[in-house]
């Protein structure tokens, strides 16, 4: 359900506003990638593998605004900027890890 809402939200609020009449997954993915300067979209499993490979431990994923460390709680503001915290929560990956020397 969240995925369908997200696709509709991207289409209505970003594609159509930009004059792009195509409501399809290729345009949505390209907008999410290149529209905000991203070069790669990570899922947790991919990011965890990379972090593990370069020596990070204690790798954890959190929801927006959450952390075991109080200094990292309630920092995410992109949802306010885009006017939709629910969709921001859907598209955001929060990962914390420890690098030991």
Image (cartoon, rainbow, N blue to C red):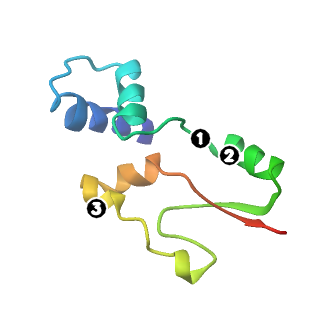
Residue under label 1 = 42
Name the N-terminal-most of marks 3 and 2.
Answer: 2
The mark nearer the N terminus, 1 or 3, is 1
Q: Quadrant of the C terminus?
A: bottom right
Sequence-wise first label, 1 or 2: 1
| Residue 3 or residue 37, whichever sits in front | 37
* Vertical arrangement, residue 53 with respect to residue 94, above or below: above
Q: Quadrant of residue 15?
A: top left
Q: Residue, x 50% and y 35% (percent of image)? A: 39
Mark 2 Cα-neighbour bin, 10 Å: few <14, some 14–19, many ≥20? some
Q: Which residue is mark 3?
A: 80
Q: Circle 2 sits on which residue?
A: 47
Q: For the residues marked 1 and 2, what is the alpha-carbon distance in whole angstroms? A: 6 Å
In the image, residue 40 lies at what x, y percent?
54, 35
- Separation of marks 3 and 2 at Cα, in angstroms: 26 Å
The picture quadrant where one finds residue 2 is top left
Q: Are marks 3 and 2 in contact (CB under 8 Å)?
A: no
Dot 1: few (<14), some (14–19), or many (≥20) neighbours within 10 Å? few
- Give the secondary structure at mark 1: loop
Query: x%, y% of residue 82?
Result: 27, 52
| Residue name at image x 34 percent, y 19 percent | 24
Question: Where is residue 63 drawn, in percent x and y?
Answer: 53, 61
Question: Do we see residue 1 in this rendering?
Answer: no
């Amino acid at each position: 359900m969240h995925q369908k809402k997200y696709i509709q939200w991207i289409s209505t609020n970003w594609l159509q506003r930009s004059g792009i009449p195509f409501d399809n997954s290729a345009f949505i993915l390209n907008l999410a990638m290149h529209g905000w300067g991203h070069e790669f979209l990570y899922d947790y499993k991919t990011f965890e593998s990379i972090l593990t490979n370069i020596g990070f431990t204690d790798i954890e994923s959190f929801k927006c605004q959450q952390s075991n460390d109080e200094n990292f709680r309630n920092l995410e503001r992109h949802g306010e900027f885009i006017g939709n915290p629910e969709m921001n929560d859907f598209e955001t990956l929060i990962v914390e890890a420890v690098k030991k020397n």
